[in-house]
Image (spheres, coloured by chain):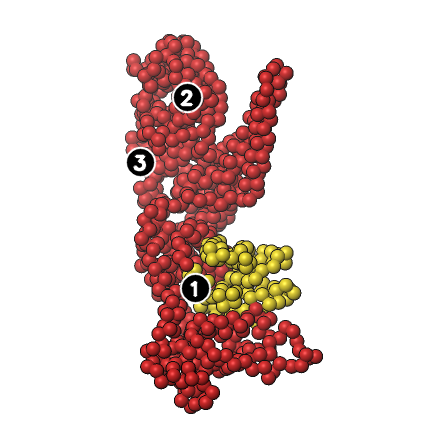
Chain colours: A yellow, B red
Amino acid sequence: MKKILAVDDSASMRQMVSFTLKKAGFDVTEAKDGVDALNIAKSNTFDLVISDVNMPNMDGITLIGHLRGLPDYKFVPMLMLTTESGLDKKSAGKAAGATGWIVKPFNPDQLLATIGKVLR
Amino acid sequence: MSIDLSQFYEVFFEESFEGLDAMESELLNLEPGTPDNETINTIFRAAHSIKGGSGTFGFSAVADFTHVVETLLDQIRDGQRQLTQVQIDLFLQSVDCLREMLSALRDSEEPDTQEAQALKAQFEAILAGDELAGLESNQVTPDDSSNTAVEEESRLGWQIQFKPGKDILKTGNEPIYMLQELGEIGDVELDINLDFVPTLETIEAEDCYFNWDIKLKSDCDLAKVDEVFEWVVDDCEINITPLETLVSAVDEEVSENATELGQAPAAEAITPAVEPENQDSSPAQSAKVTESTPAKKDNAPKNAEASSIRVGIEKVDSLINMVGELVITQAMLTQLSEGDFDKAKLVSLQEGLAQLAHNTRDLQESVMRIRMLPISFVFSRFPRLVRDTSKKLGKQIELKLLGEQTELDKTVMEKISDPMVHLVRNAMDHGLETTEERIASGKSEVGSITLNAFHQGGNIVIEIIDDGKGLNTEKIKQKAIANGLITENSDLTDEEINLLIFEPGFSTADQVSDLSGRGVGMDVVRRNIQALNGSVELASTPGEGSTFTIRLPLTLAILDGQLIRVGEHIYIIPLVNIIESLQINLEDVNCVGGEYDVLRLRDEYIPIIRLFDLFNHEPDSKKMEDGLLVVVEHDNEKIGILVDELLAQQQVVIKSLEANYMKVEGVSGATILGDGTVSLIIDISGAIKLAGLKKSVRRSIEKAVVDLESA
């Protein structure tokens, strides 16, 4: 089963993402901010990381930058959740090593379709 | 996949309200100018989350409105704008507006968007105030749809030259997946180009050296193809051209199949490709469907407010710990019951039962603690209230909050909020003087309101302290006389006179101001607090200020009760109400007006209620001297309740009669005793009413007794 790390400071978004992915047959671990995610990521391996951008403690772009530097995460796809108005974040995210992005708001089907781009 | 998004609503509302609270308290800390980065970031983040969530869950009215709020916040955060007081006020109004809208949505109602529209217009006016580049990014979405518009006519497909950047794999992107994705759009013909693959000596295992020429046979538009490469377009060389031009320009090598396609009627070629496209465009539709479902949901509970609670993990852990101990005790008792029971086991049994009692008590306390929340949940609304009110009143007011971590039951908390708001408003409006008055009387020009909470023997005590002018006892007295509450020659102490402000229909404000005195009097405050089994007291020193003290039980679920017996019936009197219990000395009893018995106890006259009369029971004896008198206090007045016998004191779990049966006068609830019988809990104020002992009657009794004595 493919393992996904879902990072979002908003509990409802996290639950929605997690629920959708679990229902689609993924093994999902949740983290509530960048620091939390980094700690979890260090003691586990994942096939995909999905992270919100704007979070307390450590934002998503910093998280992706840190993760990309870890040997285990060199090739792991990492997607950021961003809003249309946060488009300028995309290039910053790419520079940090993000694979791609999912634009909020999205519905479960869109989420799964997007994930299909990097997990097959 | 169909997923019912409504299951996430509750969490969304909860976190949104928390976010709004955070926004509000941070906004209150803001000063115009260039605000502290972390503060503005916290505010931004809250708005951002609400926008994201409301968009996702289909609350578009909220999402639209939050968008403009967020945009302005973003510009302030980026230093593109100076924060002004007007903006702070506008943000605060937005918080209120969002709260209203979200509350309506939570209750499955259509939110009123009028206010939001008005505020939105103000935001847009600010945003349009000067030309900022940042604004335009909202309208411009990097969508190549303009390109595709030209290419409306049916087409055969696309020729794609795809040369991935060398580092593409290190961003987590996988070119193979992209090719597969193209395969889902239509038929794909691949030509791989290995020209750039270096020799084995110089090859970097982690780099990508391949590139491809792709023929995609599909009538999809360019945007669809662009979407496949969306994430990598900046790092790769990608060249996309319409396939038909290539076909006509010839390419001898094009397979027969492809040539056939070129000549075949377009419609035929299109058919296979139509389906995937339709499917892929459906998210937009399904988004609409999910949007409309919440409105249709009418099985969602109204007033979902009390339906969930956040509990700290350490509380749950302690609970699990307790249950663990309980299980051990249970195992021990089970072991005891096995085999024959002899005397030797008796000691162990007693020990086991004592242990069980201990476990149960601990468990009970832990469970109660789960419902306990820090009072800061209530206190947190006051900074805003004080800020707004002080502006309106033109007074300078400082608010101090003490004991914010004091915990109390969630239900109690929800109900105490309104009375507290009323008391704080009153303190600001009537209690605190104007700045000029304060200076004239030698006080600091900033008035102070203090909210203080602490625990005191099973109760929570909340104090509302102001350093204002104190109550004007003389004015209260005159007003009370004018209202007929007391007479000229009533002999009342200053404290007793001050308490008159809690009487129905009392208001001392010379003029009814906008803030207090809008018809909801202090009597309502007291009634609400009493409904929670609480009390409110008042201390006031002229020139120095007033203190209102609210006392509340920590929980409404359990009560310390005194079991009493009348005939064969057992009732419970809340222990908090009981002052003392005594045997009656008949010499001290007077009968007033042939109707009411009054006991003279020390310097007070206490009306006696015979419980057997009240509830129509047959007592052991109707003689007063055979029974016991339980003296209870209510509303700062003492009443004696005549019973046959006092039994044990114990904690009882309150079961609502109203919910299970109907409201019964004189009874506040019921409980189940150790032997399984149901016992009713006496509601003191109800019992007094039932006995016909209205306040006026009590006063006239007192007066009669005094007259009697002096005669």
Query: Is residue B91 in view?
Result: no
Give the residue type that dot 3 points to: Gly
Q: Which residue is mark 1?
A: A110
| Along the viewing direction, whichever of B686 and B698 lies nearer the viewer | B686
At horizontal 45% and vertical 20% (from top left) the residue drawn is B675
Circle 2 residue: B677
Quadrant the C terminus of chain B occupies: top left
Residue with the most extreme right position: B201
| Distance (Cα) linking label 1 and label 3 | 61 Å
Give the residue at x 56% y 38%: B320
Q: Is residue B429 above or below residue B472?
A: below
Closest to the camera, between mark 3 and mark 2, is 2
The amino acid beneath tag 1 is Gln
Give me the chain letter of mark 2.
B
Comparing marks 1 and 2, which lies closer to the viewer? 1
Pointer 1 indicates a residue of which chain? Answer: A
Q: Position of residue B289 (x, y in %)?
A: 34, 60
Q: Are the numbered discs 3 and 2 placed on the same chain, yes or no? A: yes
Q: Earlier in the sequence, mark 3 or mark 2?
A: 3
Q: Which residue is mark 3?
A: B505
Do the numbered discs 3 and 2 sit on residues whose CB atoms are within 8 Å? no
**Residue B420, image x, y percentages:** 42, 41
- Give coordinates of residue B699: x percent, y percent: 34, 23
Is the residue marked by circle 2 packed among few (<14), some (14-19), or many (20+) residues within 10 Å? few
Q: Secondary structure at mark 2?
A: loop
The image quarter containing residue B356 is top right
Instruction: Decide: few, some or many residues near mark 1? Use Cα within 10 Å; few <14, some 14-19, many ≥20.
Output: many
Residue B573: where, in percent of width, then height?
42, 23
